[in-house]
Image: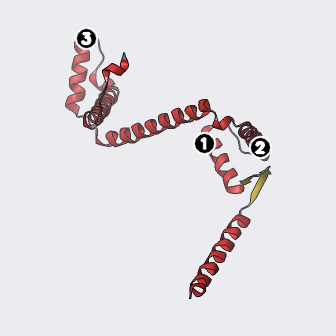
Amino acid sequence: MKSKNLLPLIFLFFLMLSCCSNEVSNKKIVTRINDYELTFDEFQNQLALELELDEDFKLTHATRKQFLEEIIQKELLIQEAKRAKLDQQKKFVQAIERYWESTLIRNLIDLKSEEIDKKVVVSEEEIKLHYDKMKKQTPSLPDFQKFHNQIEKKVKEEKRIRLLKEWMDNLRKNAGVEIFPSMLE
């Protein structure tokens, strides 16, 4: 009875294994660096990122080859660093943690800023009020219409910053933060 139940499981296992091996063999390999294989898709993704980050990067046959050489050199250095166990050193791990934390925070603030930007509206009255304050300080200030767009941007940015600060203050207010002053001495 047990062997009859195992037979379909074994068949399913080998079927999945054969599908997985076909998937790997269907990937086009651009280069093999020791045990590391760089697929064509990975190469294209890295190349696209480079094009996005470097406006001066011109895509030619020569630059593609040069870019591949840079990837190979980088991978060789990474492999050597791993052999030396540099990736396990406390200093390295802490640097990665700091980078991860700062990236996570930046992404959260960017997300919240976009959300706030969609909600922030500046009225004509607010723009005029801001202009009037500026005019009191500098009576020779040119006509309102010349500064309208600049003032609108400034007021919108001030509102955005204020709302972002309020959001962060609310995070603190609603969190369970407990400080033990004796530990700071």
- Relative placement, left or right, of 79 versus 100 is right
**Residue under the point 52% across and 32% down:** 98
Q: Nearer the viewer, mark 1 or mark 2?
A: 2
Numbered-mark total: 3
**SS for tag 3?**
helix
Answer with the quarter of the image where residue 160 lies.
Answer: top left
* Residue named by callout 2: 72
Above or below — where is 22 with respect to 126? below
Characterize the local packing of mark 3: few (<14), some (14-19) or many (20 or more) Cα atoms within 10 angstroms.
Answer: few
- Relative placement, left or right, of 84 versus 123 is right
* Residue named by callout 3: 137
Please identify the residue farthest to the front as the structure is shown.
Answer: 1
**SS for tag 2?**
helix
Tell whether label 2 touches label 1 (CB within 8 Å): no
Indicate the amino acid at tag 1.
Answer: Glu
Gap in Å between the C-alphas at discs 1 and 2?
21 Å
